[in-house]
Amino acid sequence: MNRILSRVAAGVALTLGLTSFTSVANAQPTLDSQLRSLSGQVGIWYFYMSTCPYCQKQEPALAMFDERYGIEVTPVSLDGGPPPGREFEEYVPNRGQAARLGVEVTPTLYLVHPATQQTTLLAIGLSQPRELAVRIIKAAKAAGWLERPKPESTNTDRAIPGAIAGRDRGQGDSSW
């Protein structure tokens, strides 16, 4: 059905009180809001080598997660040198974390939950910002670190007149 025609039909039905409408605008939290809700709860361990060109390309996206969402990034140097990009001035030397986690390739990223000391692998190799964002949310949900917020409904349900509709709503009629 034509989009414009569908909108017109929906508008007429709502105006006449012939249908029910529930806004879903707030039903699904956005990627941004989910990332913001993780601020201060999780961090990212960024394993790198100072000579790694892929690490240098990864750093702007990591800095964005730190700055925009408050997801702290801890660069962990596998060779003792500073991060190859300009985004991170502070870093820590590897003190066995890489071996415990099986890090063999750089960049490698782990999502860390300091309160529980749990880690989960995010990415091995260069990853795009949106891909990382989705992986962070999936990992946080899977680990139970991100609760699903209850949707704020702007429910404007209206009864459908029986004479017009012919039956009460919700009786399994798939033509609704």
Image: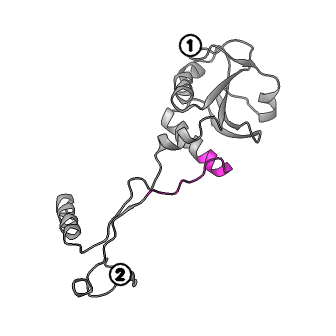
Colouring scheme, one of rainbow, by chain, secondary structure, one colour: one colour
- Left or right of 127? Residue 100 is right
**Res. 107 in view:** no
**Mark-to-mark CA distance, 1 and 2:** 61 Å
Residue 116 percent coordinates (x, y): 76, 42
Q: Residue at x 22, y 66 (%)?
A: 10
Going from the N terminus, do you reach mark 1 or mark 2 first? 1
Is 127 rendered above or below residue 63?
A: below
Membership of 167 in magenta stretch: no
**Res. 37 in view:** yes
Q: Residue at x 68, y 49 (%)?
A: 143
Membership of 150 in magenta stretch: yes
Residue position marked by numbered label 1 in the rendering: 86
| Picture quadrant where residue 6 is located | bottom left
The range drawn in magenta is: 138-152
Is 60 rendered above or below residue 32?
A: above
The amino acid type, in three-letter code, at marker 1 is Arg
Q: Secondary structure at mark 2?
A: loop
Is 56 rendered above or below residue 137?
A: above
